[in-house]
Amino acid sequence: MTKNSAHLLVIDVGNTDATFGIFDGENLLHNFRIKSLKDENYVYFEYRFRQYFLENNLRFADITKVVLSSVVPPLTPVFKSLIQNLFGLDPIVVNAYIFPTLTVSIDNPDEIGSDLVANAVAAYTKYGRNCVVVDFGTALTFTVVSAEGKVLGVSIAPGLRTAVKALFSNTAQLPEVPLELPTSVLGKNSVHAIQSGILWGYEGLVKNMIHKVRVELGGDCIAIATGGLSSIISTLKDEFVEVNRELTLEGLRIIGESR
């Protein structure tokens, strides 16, 4: 970043990772992750943050605005303090009411995750039509947004890695396995069997959920994939108009630019 540059920092604190993006306008200049270790204190996160900025020749003074999304309540005050101490800024904290042209039409808007709000903002801003955002993260989420800018509802299932870990931790003889889509559904060993059941099973889950959303919306609904595991099930690619791992960060950027 140049001496006189001014940039937007967005932070998405999830259950597995805290993801950071530094934007110059619409351009994502830097993107990095820190494990969301709930038992770690402020010092751990400050050290990792300072280390990344130093290694990449970044300056805290170049950050002029920060947007914070957190679905991990114990870490929210930690990151607020981090932002205030390192940048001298109060973050824009994302909630269901943060983006005036998007309405969260569910029973209790405060229950929706701020990351899902960011996903909805990005999808609505980019496409302006009925869409379902499928986020392949710690949880597998389906956020449905109407062409009128309303979040109509959310569906949640265990994420791919969460499902594998649950199976591994609750069975004595099954190993933890890599998330790799097998060529056959007929498992010939324990690893192959788990990969088949989870990954091919989730392929069907995702296709069925998208289909049911489209039926409820009268057929007019595009699908967008995001999240760190969004490319694992490669056979789903044709279901989506876009597979964008950074959609949440883009949504946070759009929120920041609107404030």
Image: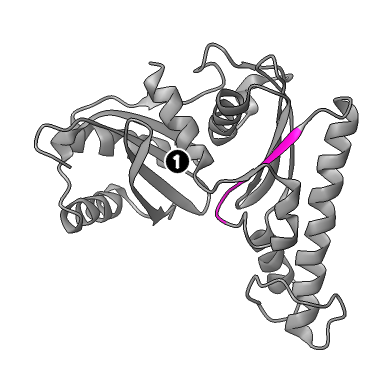
Residue highlighted by disc 1: 12
Q: Residue at x 80, y 79 (%)?
A: 193
Residue 16 as seen in the image, left or right of residue 152: left
- Look at the image and tell me in which quarter the C terminus lies: top left
The segment highlighted magenta reads 222-228
Name which residue type carries label 1.
Answer: Asp
Left-right relation of 251 to 203: left
Queried whether the magenta region covers residue 225, the answer comes back as: yes
Determine the main secondary structure of the stretch shown in magenta. strand
Q: Residue at x 74, y 73 (%)?
A: 195
Q: Is residue 235 above or below residue 218?
A: below
Q: In the visual, does 164 lie left or right of 193?
A: left
The residue lying at 63 percent from left, 75 percent from top is: 178
Please tell me how crowded label 1 is: few (under 14), some (14-19), or many (20+) other residues with Cα within 10 Å: many
Find the residue positioned furthest to the bottom. Answer: 189
Coordinates of residue 217 in the picture (x, y in percent)? 85, 25
